[in-house]
Image (cartoon, rainbow, N blue to C red):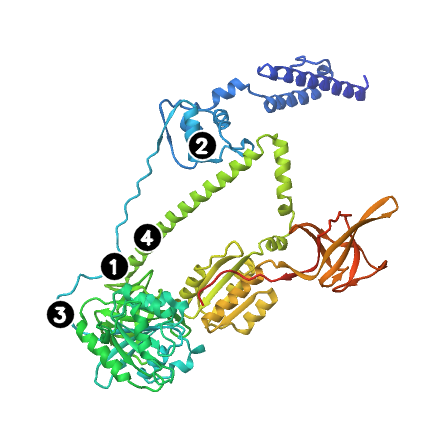
């Protein structure tokens, strides 16, 4: 036999055998029986003639047998791990997956999916690892005829409280007199900084931008009598009400400055309220009494309405008429302050561990993080280990208000402290601890507590968002309930098509009504005051204000990159941006707004908000005409209504837009199809002239109708937010 014919014959036989195997497989798979390859003859005819081909065929058959062996469904079920059947109660917990719930109930996944049909969940979107809401978990258990119980949470080992706390009150026998801490409060431009300047004999006011103190400062004033008074210079602007309120908490006496010619103003009332809330006594300083229009008596009477009663009216508030600019009666004011301090018997314990308060904090290029603080207990010295907020310091250097190094600071004395690891916040409590290791323990505990509180808040927000999204989803499902799943997908695709295929730049334009801002300031208190103003923003329906980052120090490359990512604006207060940063911002199209006066920064912020608002369309009336007669003109096969009108006011311009008013209702808006005067087509009809006109939609007229000619102009909207300036 020809060798080639023999090979072809062998291939045909193998092909026939493979077809029989496939046919047998399909049949037996349906009947859930085990499939095994169909055996051919044990010794084919050609195996005797060509044994080498038989060996090859045998190897192929063995390989096919091992590769194609399929198990039945019954065998697969036997091999599967048996799920324990749960009877009675099922332990459930929040955020269980479908697979976890099935295991807890002792059911298969199909059972869970079947139970989910009773809920509004879209089964097409579910996978075995999909997380179920607690309400749906409870419903599935109930529908399965079981009861549920909440699984016990793993109890974490309670962490030991290692926080630092104040010492118990000191023994009165060890208390010694201390200087009073005085805060000067009042309305903007009533002369607070000038008063402090005169008391300290320095020219602070000439360095301040716009005559407004820009951040809190603490100064020690030595009087000729030898007495010492510590002054807190809080900002006079309403924008810094938060810092002003904080200043009164460490204050013994408040000097309320009121201009004699202006009287009681908005910030004056706020200052009175801050002092009352802190329980601090007042001294009234009526400033600018050297001006001819000054009226100190009117000021005293106006203050009666706010429960500030001067001594001459039978109250306990001392009133001193001064002129801060000319230095008149300043010593009288100082003596009144010392006298009140003596009545208050201000004393402190100058021994033991230090306690104090951060008045201001900032980052200095040469000194690093620096704080101005007032010591309230103990004596601060070099080498002391302090804790404030979530940072700590080993005191390296201390300076007074004039920048002179000091070795110790006793109670009531303001001092600038170097050696902080991070910048604490203004108003943080300062406590001395025994060692650096103890400081680490305190900071670690406070960080842990803050994390726990943040996690709790985040969980509340997450649960609220989940509930909101679930309600929205259920509403959408109800609207689409009558549709098939294919129709639902088509509807959802059409709804989201414009977002899916929009480019990133187009998506940012969709979010044009969001202003993302980065705030950088010179000191912590300034940044906090600006953020407090932004917190009062209440016009999110017009344009959302989103503070994406804030901090202290000059504008950096990171700030510009962050602003680029969020399409935001960088606002800097009393900080700088070097040329390379400005060039980078210009290249990326990022705005950097630098200001030294707080209200100008807020005005600039309002301008940015206004620029994000869509323009409103305003109709500007050009002319008015009344319909005196109505007739029609035949043009071809159409009858066109024509109104005989007289212009009562202004003019009618065919190029402009028109509207038809009947019984004070606008029934049509559009353009004119024709405007004639004595059968001539014209463009403009002036006051007192008669004309005939027809509208573009062949609208019918009535005698007495009014025709208004107007133009539309886009006007930039302004935000309704009022920051209180």
Q: Which residue is pictured at 30% across the width and 40% down the height?
A: 155
Depth check, front residue: 354 or 4: 354
**Which numbered marker is on residue 136?**
2
Disc 3 target residue: 174
Count neighbours of disc 3 (C-alpha within 10 A) and say few if under 14, some if 14 to 19, many if 20 or more: few
Depth check, front residue: 620 or 87: 620
Count neighbours of disc 1 (C-alpha within 10 A) and say few if under 14, some if 14 to 19, many if 20 or more: some
Count neighbours of disc 4 (C-alpha within 10 A) and say few if under 14, some if 14 to 19, many if 20 or more: some
**Does 231 appear above or below 421?**
below
Q: Residue furthest right?
A: 636
Q: Find the distance from the CA under tag 4 to the CA under tag 2.
A: 33 Å
N-term-proximal mark, 4 vs 2: 2
Q: Find the distance from the CA under tag 2 to the CA under tag 1.
A: 46 Å
N-term-proximal mark, 2 vs 1: 2
Q: Quadrant of the C terminus?
A: bottom left
Helix, strand or loop for disc 3: helix
x and y percent of residue 80 in the render? Answer: 47, 23
Disc 1 target residue: 164
**Which numbered marker is on residue 449?**
4
x and y percent of residue 373 in the render? Answer: 30, 70
């Amino acid at each position: 036999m020809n060798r080639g014919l023999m090979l072809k014959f062998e291939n045909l036989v193998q092909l026939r055998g493979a077809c029989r195997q496939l046919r047998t497989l399909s049949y037996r798979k349906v009947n859930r029986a085990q499939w095994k390859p169909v055996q051919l003859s044990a010794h084919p005819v050609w195996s005797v003639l060509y044994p080498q081909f038989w060996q090859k065929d045998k190897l192929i058959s063995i390989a096919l047998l091992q590769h194609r062996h399929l198990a039945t469904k019954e065998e697969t079920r036997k091999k599967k791990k048996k799920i324990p059947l749960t009877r009675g109660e099922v332990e459930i917990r929040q955020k269980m997956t479908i697979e976890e719930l099935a295991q807890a109930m002792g059911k298969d996944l199909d059972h869970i999916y079947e139970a989910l049909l009773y809920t509004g969940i879209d089964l097409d979107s579910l996978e075995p690892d999909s997380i179920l809401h607690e309400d749906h978990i409870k419903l599935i258990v109930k529908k399965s005829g079981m009861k549920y119980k909440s699984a016990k949470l793993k109890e974490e080992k309670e962490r030991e409280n290692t926080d630092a706390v104040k010492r118990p009150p000191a023994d009165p026998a060890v208390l010694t007199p201390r200087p009073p801490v005085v805060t000067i409060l009042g309305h903007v431009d009533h002369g607070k900084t000038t008063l402090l300047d005169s008391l300290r004999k320095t020219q602070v006011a000439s360095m301040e931008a716009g005559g407004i103190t820009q951040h809190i400062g603490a100064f020690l004033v030595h009087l000729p009598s030898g007495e010492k008074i510590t002054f807190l210079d809080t900002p006079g602007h309403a924008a810094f009400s938060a810092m002003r309120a904080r200043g009164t908490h460490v204050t013994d006496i408040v000097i309320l400055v009121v201009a004699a010619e202006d009287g009681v103003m908005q910030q004056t009332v706020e200052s009175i309220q801050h002092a009352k809330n802190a329980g601090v006594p007042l001294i009234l300083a009526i400033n600018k009494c050297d001006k001819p229009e000054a009226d100190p008596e009117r000021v005293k009477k106006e203050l009666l309405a706010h429960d500030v009663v001067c001594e001459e009216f039978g109250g306990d508030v001392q009133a001193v008429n001064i002129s801060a600019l000319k230095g008149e009666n300043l010593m009288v004011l100082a003596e009144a302050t010392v006298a009140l301090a003596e009545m208050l018997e201000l004393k402190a314990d100058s021994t033991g561990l230090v306690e104090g308060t951060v008045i201001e904090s900032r980052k200095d290029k040469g000194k690093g993080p620096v704080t101005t603080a007032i010591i309230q207990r103990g004596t601060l010295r070099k080498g002391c280990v302090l804790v404030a907020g979530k940072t700590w310091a080993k005191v390296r250097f201390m300076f007074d208000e004039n920048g002179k190094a000091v070795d110790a600071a006793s109670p009531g004395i303001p001092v600038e402290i170097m050696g902080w690891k991070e910048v604490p916040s203004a108003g943080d409590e300062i406590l001395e601890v025994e060692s650096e290791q103890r400081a680490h323990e305190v900071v670690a505990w406070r960080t842990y507590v803050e994390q726990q509180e943040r996690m709790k808040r985040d969980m509340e927000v997450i649960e609220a968002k989940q509930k909101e999204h679930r309600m929205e989803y259920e509403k959408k499902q109800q609207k689409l309930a009558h549709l098939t799943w294919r129709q639902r997908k088509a509807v959802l695709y059409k709804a989201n098509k414009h977002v899916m295929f929009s480019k990133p730049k187009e998506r940012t334009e969709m979010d044009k009504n969001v202003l993302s801002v980065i705030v950088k300031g010179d000191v912590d208190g300034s940044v906090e005051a600006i953020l407090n103003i932004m917190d009062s923003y209440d016009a999110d329906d017009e344009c959302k204000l989103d503070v994406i980052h804030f901090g202290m120090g000059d504008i950096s490359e990171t700030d510009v990159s962050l602003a680029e990512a969020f399409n935001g604006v960088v606002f800097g207060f009393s900080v700088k941006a070097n040329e390379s940063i400005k060039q980078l911002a210009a290249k990326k199209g990022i705005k950097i707004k630098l200001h030294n006066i707080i209200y100008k920064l807020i005005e600039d912020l309002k301008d940015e908000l206004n620029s994000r608002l869509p323009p409103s369309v305003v109709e500007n009336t050009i002319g008015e005409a009344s319909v005196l007669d109505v007739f029609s003109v035949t043009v071809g096969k159409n009858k066109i209504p024509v109104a005989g009108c007289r212009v009562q006011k202004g003019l009618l311009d065919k190029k402009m837009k028109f509207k038809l008013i009947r019984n004070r209702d606008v029934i049509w808006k559009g353009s004119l199809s024709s405007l004639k005067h004595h059968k001539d087509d014209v463009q403009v009809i002036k006051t007192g002239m008669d004309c005939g006109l027809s509208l573009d939609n062949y609208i019918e007229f009535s005698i007495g109708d009014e025709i208004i000619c107007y133009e539309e102009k886009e006007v930039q909207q302004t935000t309704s937010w009022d920051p209180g300036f």
